[in-house]
Image (cartoon, rainbow, N blue to C red):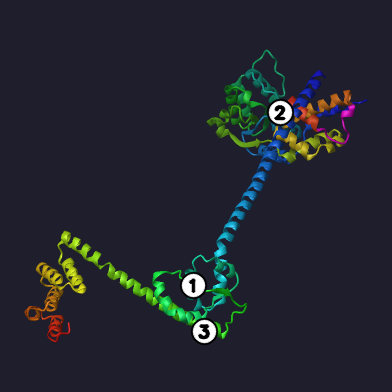
Amino acid sequence: MNNHFENIKNIFIDSIERNSYVELKSAQYNYQLLEKSLDKPLKMILLFGKPGTGKSMLLNKLYHNLKESREIFYFDAPILSEKEFLRRVYESITNKEVSRELRVNFDALLRFCQKLKGQREIVFLLDECQLYSEALMEKIRLLSDTRTVKFIITLHKTDNEDIIAKQHFKTRIWEVVELSNVSEDDLHLYIQKKLIQKGFVEISNMIKKKHIKFIYTYTQGNFRETNKFLYTLFDIYEYFYENRPHKVSNEKFSKKFLEMAALKLGYIDG
Amino acid sequence: MDNIKELEKRWYFYKAKQSLLSLNAGAFILMLSLGGYYSYLKSDVIMGLFNKKTLIAETKTKIPELIEEPVLMANAQTLKKDVVIASKNEGLNSSLYEVSLEPVIPIVNMESKSRKRTASKRTYKATNNTKSSQRKMVKAKASTYLTASELSTIKHEIKHSRVISRDTENIKKINLNGSSVNYIETMKKKFSISKKPREALLLAKAFYAKGKYSQSEKWALTANKLDSSKDESWHIFAKSKAKLGQKNQALKILSSYYKKSHSPKTKALIVKIKTERL
């Protein structure tokens, strides 16, 4: 007997894959704002919000949508080494591979970018910038001053907010897009769309508003928390479907399993 | 998989805890509502008892009113006084209460009344409860109209009550005179303390009224010594002298005082003594 709950739970594995992106009204608005900002003569654009609000997903979507029409590069994982970061930037701009033994001279890179002014506009998408060192952030700033290179950076709202507050960033970050947790209705839509995308319409229909309310009480509309919750929930479903299938209803969504998932994640005390 | 089993156990424990909590909450609400209901009921009982007590008290206080009210209602306003007097004279005569549940008016036996009228005048002063003064209370007719004989009885009764009132006034006057000895004594005490001409003059007046002219002459002189400007001290002194047979001396004193004071009262008194109309 095929256990479809295994596939369902995998839908909610936290990933930034393009095909797992769910179009929500709020996300759509933020995406359009970000896209318009790229057309403006801005040096840096800040995308910030609490963890799990969809920053990386939005950045990923932007990259995939614009990679054909623009010179856009996406650094999904933070590059902590300055040497590595400069090498990656140089490789992206020149489209040439630099040997690991060689080191990119920052001043030379800066002069190279200055020469390209007015000829090219290169966009770099940098995720998890709160992990970058201050020195590296200063170099990013200097590179953006050449007007050849434009940066869209994401930051966690709570972490390193002081960096943004610093004078040099205040003057350079011209556009700020803030992401927040979604509403209860949007969360319902998110879960439904996720399930329907993968063809689990019946399961999607089984989830009623009261179940969403229960989930929302603990996840507060945070995508990461919701994914974690639903993964755990369908993991429990999977177990019961395999071991005690009589306990799994095909018509009703189990409140017991919802509570068990909340217990497992520590949202409620057992 | 063992994790899920363990998780299920935890869930059962969680549910038991939750149901226990809700049970407690339910019991608490039930207790509250029962308490509220009980207190509500109790308040009803208390209120009921209270109402009962007040009703009893009201009925108790209403009894005398029930006795008197029909009497007043059945008779004309003019009769009200007589009925009250009659009931007072009867005192706590139980027969009055027995018959007074229905409209009652006093009926007087005319024959016995005419015979005993004079006697009753005398005896009334001595006692209020003599047989002659007692009236018979009879049941009145259901109608508020009175017969001619009844009306004549009532008119007569009104006259009789007036006589009684006059007699009581006389009693009061006698009592006032009877207290004059005490009055002189108290005035004397007062004068001994205050030594005021007013007390001396009041004493002179009292003695003069009692016919003790030598005393009144003495007290008038004392008052005059203390304050010679008062007409009355001169007047009582002269009147006392005249009463003691010293008419000329009295006239001398008054005429010499008249020269000073030119008081019209003094002049009138001089004329009275001269014409012997004192």
User: Furthest-top residue in view?
Assistant: A101
Q: Which residues are magenta?
A: A245-254
On what subunit does the disc labeled 3 rest?
Answer: B
Mark 3 or 2, which is nearer the eye? 3
Could you tell me which chain the residue with mark 2 belongs to?
A: A
Q: Amino acid at mark 3?
A: Ser
Q: Amino acid at mark 1?
A: Gln
Using residue B214 as the reference point, say whether residue A168 is left or right of it.
Answer: right
On the same chain, marks 2 and 1? The answer is no
> Residue A72: x, y in percent?
71, 30
Which label belongs to residue A268? Answer: 2
Which residue is under mark 3?
B152
In the rendered structure, the answer to whether residue B75 lies left or right of residue B18 reads left
Main SS of residues in magenta? loop
Mark positioned earlier in the residue sequence (3 or 1): 1
Name the foreground residue: B153 vs B191: B153
Q: In the image, is residue B264 above or below residue B11? A: below
Q: Quadrant of the N terminus of chain B?
A: top right
User: Of discs 2 and 1, which sits in the foreground?
Assistant: 1
